[in-house]
Image (cartoon, helix red, strand yellow):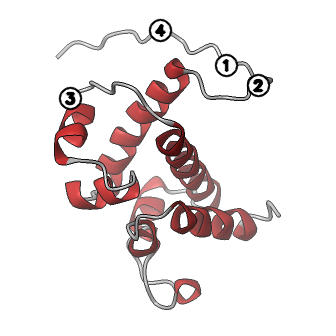
Amino acid sequence: MALEAIAPVVADPSAQKILPSEAEAGARAIVNLFDRWSVTDEQARAMLGHMSQRSWARWKAGEFGRINHDLATRLSLLLGIHKGIRYLFTDRQDGYRWIKKPNATFGGESALDVLTQGSIFSLMRVRNYLDAERGGW
């Protein structure tokens, strides 16, 4: 399989909405991230707002279609979670393992357990925790 160049995404920080090209770039990153986290299809779909099996299969095949505001927000939160983990763990594998380890802050559940509850608030809870841990608040 040959590598294909992906056109760069031109971001406009003053824009009030996420451009389709930005959302697609985020979706590609999330598919790769979920692979590294070794999440099941069911877990991935829950984090993405209980996405249908068919849509998730298309995403894994690189076909993203239209990404609505809710889904774009979820992508942003998940990428922020990834960023927070990367800041806290110098070893990538430690970060990838952390996502599944029980955590007293989450009542003994893992971050993945919280993330797969399916609500935006669950994603925000993990994101806020990581931001606080790294001194971002």
Q: Between marks 4 and 3, how big is the CA–CA gap?
A: 18 Å
Q: Residue at x 50, y 84 (%)?
A: 103
CB under 8 Å between discs 2 and 4: no
CB under 8 Å between discs 1 and 2: yes
Identify the disc placed on residue 11: 1
- Vertical relation: 72 (above or below) 78: above
* Badge 3 amino acid: Ala
* Badge 2 amino acid: Pro
Residue at label 4?
Answer: 7
Q: Between marks 3 and 1, how big is the CA–CA gap?
A: 25 Å
Q: Residues within 10 Å of mark 3 (few under 14, many from 20)?
A: few
- Vertical relation: 66 (above or below) 43: above
Element on which disc 1 rests: loop
Q: Residue at x 47, y 26 (%)?
A: 25
Q: Between marks 1 and 2, how big is the CA–CA gap?
A: 6 Å
* Badge 4 amino acid: Ala
Residue at label 2?
Answer: 13
Which numbered disc, 2 or 4, marks the residue closer to the eye?
2
Q: Between marks 1 and 4, how big is the CA–CA gap?
A: 12 Å
* Badge 1 amino acid: Ala
